[in-house]
Image (cartoon, rainbow, N blue to C red):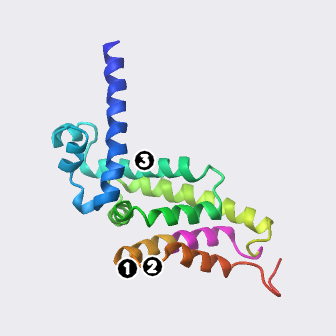
């Protein structure tokens, strides 16, 4: 019984750490949100915080997982659509620290040995499948040209989204959602387009 109680407390503390870390990283960014600062925010030492995670990289990967979980609960379901994507992108403009964390870890995670590598592979595959399905539905509704490969559209939108995040970090005046909307508008059926 004691072990089970300790395990439940550990899970609860880990959730508290991640929830608090979302706010700290959103406000201060990846570089300025140190393990020490995150630990202090939840009343732990840096060593105490890392007791719940194998490394700083695993901690930051867990923060991104928590962000995705939060976004899924707040903005959409498994049946994500184009409007939900645009809503999330607009929200990202309000949390620059999390966008910075995502962009930084995404680059580092191309190394198969990086602790975030599997997270980014799985996330990319899941988003590709969700968005491909959203494109198919949009094609069936006549909102996107039927002659376009849904996988190509999904890959293009994800690449555009990730690239725009990097540009936006350099120039916060860029309206990421407006650029994606303009790209999607170019995919809409027009005069003479295949139906």
Q: Residue at x 56, y 55 (%)?
A: 126
Write the residue at 25% across / 40% down: 42
Label whose residue precedes the other's in the sequence (3 or 2)? 3
Disc 3: CA contacts within 10 A as few (<14), some (14-19) or many (>=20): some
Residue identifier under label 1? 171
The answer to whether 79 appears left or right of 38 in the picture is right
Residue 49 in picture, x, y percent from top left = 23, 40
Q: Helix, strand or loop at disc 3?
A: helix
> Which residues are the magenta region?
146-160
Q: Is residue 122 above or below residue 175?
A: above
Asked if the residues shown at circle 1 and circle 2 are in contact, with their CB atoms under 8 angstroms apart, the answer is yes
* Image position, residue 75 (x, y; %): 57, 53
Near mark 2 (Cα within 10 A), the count class, few <14, some 14-19 or many ≥20, is some
Mark closer to the observer (3, 2):
2
Indicate the quadrant containing the N terminus: top left, top right, bottom left or bottom right: top left
Specify the quadrant of the image occupied by residue 94: bottom left
Specify the farthest residue to the bottom.
Answer: 192
Residue 118: % across, % down: 42, 53
What residue is rendered at 75% in x and 76% in y? 145
Q: Identify residue for label 3.
A: 66
- Residue 67 vs residue 40, the one in the foreground: 40
On whether residue 82 falls in the magenta region, the answer is: no
Estimate the spatial distance between the alpha carbons at disc 3 and disc 2, rounded to whole Å: 26 Å
Give the main secondary structure of the magenta stretch: helix
- Is residue 136 visible in the rendered image? The answer is yes
**Cα distance in 3D space between marks 1 and 2:** 6 Å
Circle 1: is it few (<14), some (14-19), or many (20+) Cα within 10 Å?
A: few
Q: Is residue 113 visible?
A: no
Q: Earlier in the sequence, mark 1 or mark 3?
A: 3
Please tell me whether residue 61 is drawn above or below residue 192 in the rendered image.
Answer: above
């Amino acid at each position: 019984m004691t072990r089970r109680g300790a395990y439940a407390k550990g899970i609860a503390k880990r959730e508290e750490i991640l929830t608090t870390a979302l706010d700290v990283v959103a406000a201060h960014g990846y570089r300025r949100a140190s393990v020490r600062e995150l630990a202090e925010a939840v009343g732990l030492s840096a060593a105490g915080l890392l007791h719940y995670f194998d490394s700083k990289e695993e901690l930051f990967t867990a923060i991104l997982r928590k962000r995705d979980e939060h976004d899924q609960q707040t903005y959409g379901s498994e049946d994500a659509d184009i409007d939900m994507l645009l809503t999330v992108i607009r929200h990202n403009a309000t949390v620059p620290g999390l966008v910075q964390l995502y962009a930084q870890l995404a680059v580092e995670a191309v190394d198969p040995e990086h602790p975030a590598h599997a997270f980014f592979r799985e996330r990319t595959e899941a988003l590709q499948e969700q968005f491909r399905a959203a494109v198919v539905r949009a094609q069936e509704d006549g909102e996107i040209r039927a002659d376009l490969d849904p996988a190509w559209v999904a890959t293009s939108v994800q690449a555009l989204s990730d690239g725009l995040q990097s540009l936006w970090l350099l120039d916060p005046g860029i309206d990421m959602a407006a650029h994606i909307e303009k790209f999607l508008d170019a995919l809409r059926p027009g005069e003479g387009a295949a139906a």
